[in-house]
Amino acid sequence: MSKLSAIRGMNDLLPEQTALWQKVETTARQILQSYGYREIRFPIVEYTELFKRSIGDVTDIVEKEMYTFEDRNGESLTLRPEGTACCVRAGEQHGLFYNQTQRLWYTGPMFRYEKPQKGRYRQFHQLGVESFGFATVDMDAEMIALSARLWKALGIDHQVELQLNTLGDKTSRLRYVEALNEFLQPIKDQLDYDSQQRLDKNPLRILDSKDANTQALLKAAPRLHDYLDEESTRDFSELCARLDALGISYTINQNLVRGLDYYNKTVFEWVTEQLGAQGTICAGGRYDGLVEQLGGRSTPAVGFALGLERLVLMLEHWTEMAQQSQAPLAYAMAQKPEFSPELAAIIERLRDALPEKNLLMHCGGGSIKSQMKKADKSGAAMAIILGEQEVQDNTVAIKFLREQRDQVVLAQAELIKFLQENG
Ligand code: ATP
Ligand code: MG
């Protein structure tokens, strides 16, 4: 019989990896809380319709990347490829956008049928941040500042760069697409295959073609910013001024258009050179039309999603440190099996008094020597030993495993205070 294995592109996260993930998640949570964002959770599966109507029919995601299936009712369902559409659906369904503003975040797995490679998987994880009811660019700047703070907290602020653009409003974008189309149609044959496919359906996406020849041809193309409406132009320069005032540097990239249809005005990406072709670690923008498009009242919105796998790849040098921070404070062992119940009771009392401390109780018997080996391997700072003498005297022995320090014997009653002061 062949061995079972995970689905291609869907990864297990083993205990030695989760320490780093938790570090990233805790840092992000803390920053989100400091900006007043609240967590929202929604299902992993939604009606296929939701993604078609939001992300757009002629996008890579909807055309080729969705995990879509029929359930037993014959209803078409899809594993969520991203969270914004779900967040809008949930918020709208529960009246969160009615006469109020919202600052929300979520995290969890997303699913896209892509060619698996470093930084690109079929199940991957995003942290999404969305705000609703804010029409002005102070919110766009807040989103960018929040993400910049996260890079700083994680120590990668010098390895990422902010790319910024505005897509204008719907009308100005349509005018631009028309001009772009007029420019590209006569040279259609010279474009790469993907771009040729996009020309009739979604010409804007040709701007972010990775093909060098297409990019060279685009140099002579009409520029999006020459077609912008007045309000978008004004908003964009105000956003730039705000970022300048916050000391956040950026590069304006007029070819940055994003792969999803629902964006308008501000779009941005945080990119790095460290991850090869999978260089975008975080992407987002304004999507003022989406709530209405999905049947709600017109509600301005801004958001971004960051790819946790790519972020963690950038932080791999932290793995060991993250693991060490999870090492136990103490490893408790009994000299003889009959002392084990008493030791367990002592350790339980410690857990009552010191719930934040990491205390490992040896399980499975064995000699003191073999227990000591396990204590050492666990990374614990000290061993708590209950032997014959200690049982008689109501004491425990403490052996320090990571520092040159003499073994001490403590009254059991003093143990709480000792661990508070020594860990
Ligand atoms: P890309 O151009 O790399 O395919 P995208 O534009 O499809 O990205 P978004 O839909 O904007 O990506 O998702 C936001 C972020 O989620 C990306 O910037 C990236 O960090 C991450 N991401 C997207 N797809 C994947 C994937 N298949 N595997 C891992 N991370 C992903
Ligand atoms: Mg993609």
Image (spheres, rainbow, N blue to C red):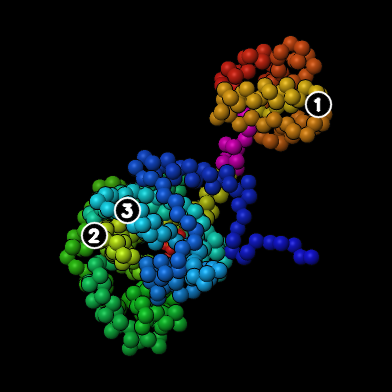
Q: Amino acid at mark 1?
A: Pro
Label 1's element? helix
Are the residues tagged 1 and 2 within 8 Å (C-beta)?
no
Q: CA distance from mark 1 to mark 2?
A: 71 Å
Q: Which residue is painted at 49% across and 67% down in the image?
A: 77
Of tags 3 and 1, the one toward the viewer is: 3
Q: Which residues are magenta?
A: 320-329
- Please name the amino acid that badge 2 sits on: Phe
Position in image of residue 338 (x %, y %)? 80, 23
Q: At which x and y percent is residue 371?
A: 77, 31
**Which is nearer the N-term, disc 3 or disc 1?**
3
Please identify the quadrant where the N terminus is shown.
Answer: bottom right
Residue positioned most to the left:
230
Q: Is residue 267 above or below residue 134?
A: below
Secondary structure beneath dot 3 equals loop
Residue at the spot of label 1: 337
Closer to the camera in the image, 40 or 149: 40
Q: How far across and how far down the image is residue 353, in percent?
A: 57, 22
User: 112 or 422, which is in the foreground?
Assistant: 112
Q: Which mark is residue 167?
A: none
| Residue 399 seen from this side | no
Whether the residues at callouts 3 and 1 have beta carbons within 8 Å, the answer is no
Q: Which residue is mark 3?
A: 95
Residue 19 in view, yes or no: yes
Q: Earlier in the sequence, mark 2 or mark 3?
A: 3
x 62%, y 55%: residue: 12
- Pointer 2 residue: 236
Q: Position of residue 19 (x, y in %)?
A: 57, 44
Would residue 38 be found to the left or right of residue 346 on screen? left
What amino acid type is highlighted by mark number 3? Gly
